[in-house]
Amino acid sequence: MLDPTLNTFVGNLAPAALDRTEVGRRRDEVSTRLNLSTLTVRRMFESGSWSHGTGVAAHSDVDYMAIASGVRPMRPSTALATAKAALAGSSWKISAVAVSSPIVAVTYHVSPNFEVAPAWFKETIRGHSVYWIAGRSDEWVVSAPGAHLAYVSSQNDRLNKKVKPLIRLMKAWKYSVGAPVSSFYLEMRTAEYASRETSIVYDIDLRRMFDRIIDYQARDMNDPEGIVGRIPACASEDKRRTTLRLAQEALTNLEIAQAARDANNKTANWIAMSKVFGDKYPWPTW
């Protein structure tokens, strides 16, 4: 038996619409400060899930690429420190500024918050811009946000707009259990999985996604677009092992939930699903 409750839950995961005027005002303020720094940022654009349909309510900041025209430093940590220094104390609206490679996290007293990645243009591949951004180990790595957003959207369009909601479910699990895995990795792993499918049924494909992560041991993946090489999954070996354990637990609980649905046991079903998604998971509607 399929689970209509999961459809209801995924429909509630979308972030609330934010005031685009305020977002634009904050972007202009951040851009101005970064332009005055040695980064010399001339342009910023949204590069993440907030406007792309894969964000999760209460967990999605507005992601920006800040395209710098100043000299690219030898180490990304220098660029990140420069961006942090430029933004710290720049506005009464900002409560905290912190570095979390590859971004500078800008926390406001009132949402939305920003995540800003200093970036330098590298080249154009198949019509998509490729940039240098900070990597995990204070090294420069390449990023192609336009190509990857297009890849996810193409799979979503092909499969009746169900790939992005499946991505949201994977991210909702990450946030609920505290899995130390990259949201971008979950997005690309899900889209890569979907590229071989002819349809998406959330409760079936959700279990298959955890199967896939377990099969690959929560390790880095190849870029399905072949532009950036490897897409990092976790920031350390300890975090990889933790993510793998949490994925195994999620799969077990999803299987318990399926058995409970088959037995028409709503209590057991909800308990199992709440272990995956938290206690805000709705009571079964079947």
Image (cartoon, helix red, strand yellow):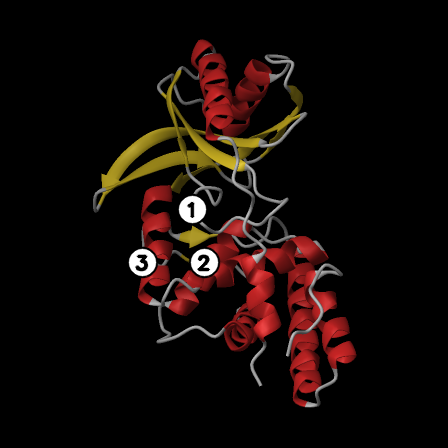
Mark 2 or mark 3, earlier in chain: 3
What is the crowding at mark 2: few (fewer than 14 residues within 10 Å), some, or many (at least 20)?
many
The residue lying toward the viewer, choosing from 22 and 155, is 22
Q: Nearer the viewer, residue 277 or 64?
A: 277
* Residue 77 relative to residue 259: left or right: left
* Residue 271, image quadrant: bottom right
Amino acid type, mark 1? His
For label 1, count other residues whose C-alpha is less than 10 Å away and answer few (under 14), some (14-19) or many (20+): some
Where is 164 relative to 267, above or below?
above
Q: Are marks 2 and 1 in contact (CB under 8 Å)?
A: yes
- SS at mark 2? helix
**Residue, disc 1:** 52
State which quadrant residue 240 falls in.
Answer: bottom right
Dot 2 and dot 3 residues touching (CB under 8 Å):
no
Q: Which residue position is annotated with label 2?
A: 164
The answer to which of 253 and 144 lies nearer the viewer is 253
Mark 3 → mark 1, Cα distance in angstroms: 12 Å
Q: Would you name the residue on which mark 3 appears? A: 154
Which three-letter amino acid code belongs to the residue tagged 2?
Lys
Quadrant where the C terminus is found in the figure = bottom right
Crowd rating for badge 3 (residues with CA inside 10 Å; few <14, some 14–19, many 20+): some
